[in-house]
Amino acid sequence: MSVSHVTTHILDTAAGKPAAGVAVELYARDGEAWSQIGTGTTDADGRVKDLGPERLASGVYRLQFDTAAYFAGIGTDTFFPEVSLTFTVDEGEEHYHVPLLLSPFAYSTYRGS
């Protein structure tokens, strides 16, 4: 299995464990429009390694997380039915890891390694 140029991983900080089964979509911006270029679902460790292409062109990209379905699945209300993270990619960079730290009423992110 090859690893995507962009990977992600979600930790449910309220539960203190990885968020498994979260649908994630990867989009590329083309002018004002967005095109879906990859999809995946977090594994038991909360990771998606095969989200999209092995290499991306420089540009603006977005990860969209279906947090409503995840929280509904664990019987928890949430304020954020989805989380959308927009970031830039430089095609010369080897890899981009974009983690999501998630709770029902807050989230944070950073560029991981």
Image (spheres, rainbow, N blue to C red):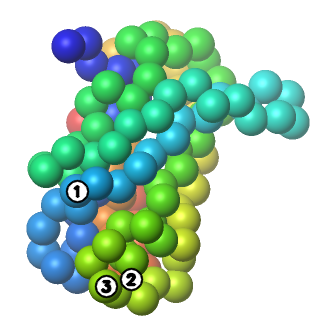
Q: Splitting the image into 4 quarters, where does residue 21 fall?
A: bottom left
99 relative position to 92: left or right: left
Q: Find disc 2 in the rendering and name its residue.
A: 104
Count all numbered tags in the image, as a single digit.
3
Q: Which residue is mark 1?
A: 20
Residue contact at pointers 2 and 3, CB within 8 angstroms: no
Residue drawn at point x = 51 percent, y = 41 percent? 25
The location of residue 71, given as percent across then percent down, is: 36, 75
**Which quadrant would residue 52 be assigned to in this image?**
top left
Question: In front of the other: label 2 or label 1?
Answer: 1
- Three-letter amino acid code at disc 1? Ala
Are dots 3 and 1 in contact, CB under 8 Å? no
6 vs 91, nearest the viewer = 6
Answer yes or no: is residue 1 visible. yes
* Amino acid bearing label 2: Pro
| Position above or below: 83 against 97 | below
Q: How many other residues sit within 10 Å of disc 2, few (<14), some (14-19) or many (≥20)?
A: some
Q: Nearer the viewer, mark 2 or mark 3?
A: 3
Check disc 3 and report the residue beneath it. 75
Q: Quadrant of the C terminus?
A: top left
Residue that protrudes farthest toward the right in the picture: 32
Residue type highlighted by circle 3: Gly
Indicate left or right for 56 with 16 as reference.
right
